Image (cartoon, helix red, strand yellow):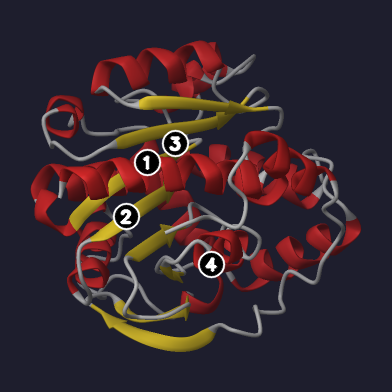
């Protein structure tokens, strides 16, 4: 199986040529579907040949499957079948969520959805983006047979209150309640503190308008109490990749230390928190290298 982009130079050149796109427009090869998860109906899409090895890309807080519009094609072109879904409470899965009796978007809710989606197909190469990296590690710790490899994309490289390690504001993280932290994050997105182009900014604003604010509050609260499954992840036996940007929320030093703790390869790109948007070809190249390591072990 050969990749369409098989060298670092080629991948970097393609990333340098990226132009603004309509983020709401799906890849013409993609098939949209609804997945009936424990929390409700989740919006999802798949792209590629279902007979090929499966890759599952999971977005984080305030995100959606569209975050992988640029990442999925090079994976498909390399011979993989790619799927993604919106987390409960987020974007087109805004109607999914907790029962009235519990009323909270908690770890059991998100983990049950995550595991159910993985169980609906063959064992997968999984990418967890930011908050979803926490969920992916929890799933791997409990159900390693569902994974062929795991990529943690700008996922918090800490446990407990992960915001304590965020650049600049980290020392103040323990004083901010979840609702305040969620509000600051949403404010930063809406006011374009990440400096994205107008097409991306328009999309994320429209996405935020339908995302359930309560779900974002609860996710931030969950990230302030991240379980420590480091030992189980390290002992899982599946190839691991920690991928981050030089200007991520958490310093590269922390990502490198975490990668060392779990026995993962480390990839660092000249970007920020969203390599799947800004350096997708380089990220895909490193993911495929990880996939091939897993295939050699099979």
Q: Position of residue 274 (x, y in %)?
A: 63, 43
Q: Is residue 251 above or below residue 137?
A: above
**For numbered disc 1, what is the local secondary structure?**
helix
- Which residue was labeled with disc 3? 155
Image disc number at residue 125: 2
Front-most of residues 39 and 237: 237
The answer to whether one can see residue 172 in this image is yes
- Circle 4 is placed at which residue position? 65
Give left or right: position of 23 versus 298. right
Residue assigned mark 1? 290
Residue found 56% across the figure and 71% down from its top: 91
| Position above or below: 237 against 165 | below
Give the camera-side residue of 93 and 29: 29
Marks 4 and 2, Cα distance to the nearest angstrom?
16 Å
Query: How busy is the neighbourhood of tag 2: few (under 14 within 10 Å), some, or many (20 plus)?
Result: many
Q: Is residue 280 above or below residue 35?
A: above
Q: Secondary structure at mark 3?
A: loop
Q: Is residue 54 left or right of residue 89?
A: left
- Against 16, residue 84 (above or below) is below
Please tell me whether mark 4 or mark 1 is closer to you in this view. 1
Callout 2: SS: strand
Find the distance from the CA under tag 4 to the CA under tag 1: 22 Å
Picture quarter containing residue 105? bottom left
């Amino acid at each position: 199986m050969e990749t369409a982009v098989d060298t670092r130079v080629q991948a970097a050149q393609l990333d340098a040529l990226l132009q603004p796109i309509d983020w709401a427009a799906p890849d013409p090869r993609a098939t949209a579907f609804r997945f009936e998860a424990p929390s409700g109906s989740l919006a999802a899409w798949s792209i590629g040949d279902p007979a090929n090895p499966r890759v599952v890309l999971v977005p984080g807080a305030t995100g959606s499957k569209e975050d992988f519009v640029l990442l999925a094609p090079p994976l498909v072109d390399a011979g993989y079948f790619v799927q993604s879904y919106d987390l409960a409470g987020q974007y087109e899965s805004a109607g999914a969520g907790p029962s009235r009796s519990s009323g909270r978007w908690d770890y059991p809710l998100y983990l049950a959805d995550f595991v159910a989606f993985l169980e609906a197909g063959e064992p997968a190469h999984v990418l967890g983006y930011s908050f979803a990296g926490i969920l992916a590690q929890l799933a791997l710790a409990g159900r390693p047979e569902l994974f062929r490899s795991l990529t943690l994309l700008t996922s918090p490289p800490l446990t407990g209150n992960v915001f304590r390690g965020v650049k600049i504001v980290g020392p103040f993280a323990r004083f901010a309640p979840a609702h305040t932290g969620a509000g600051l994050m949403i404010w930063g997105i809406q006011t374009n503190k990440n400096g994205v182009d107008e097409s991306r900014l328009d999309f994320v604003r429209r996405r935020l308008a339908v995302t359930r604010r309560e779900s974002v509050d609860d996710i931030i609260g969950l990230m302030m109490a991240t379980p420590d499954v480091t030992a189980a992840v390290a002992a899982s036996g599946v190839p691991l990749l920690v991928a981050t940007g030089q200007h991520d929320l958490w310093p590269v030093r922390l990502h490198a230390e975490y990668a060392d703790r779990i026995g993962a390869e480390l990839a660092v790109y000249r970007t920020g928190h969203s390599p799947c948007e800004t350096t997708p070809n380089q990220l895909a190249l490193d993911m495929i290298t990880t996939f091939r390591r897993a295939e050699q072990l099979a």
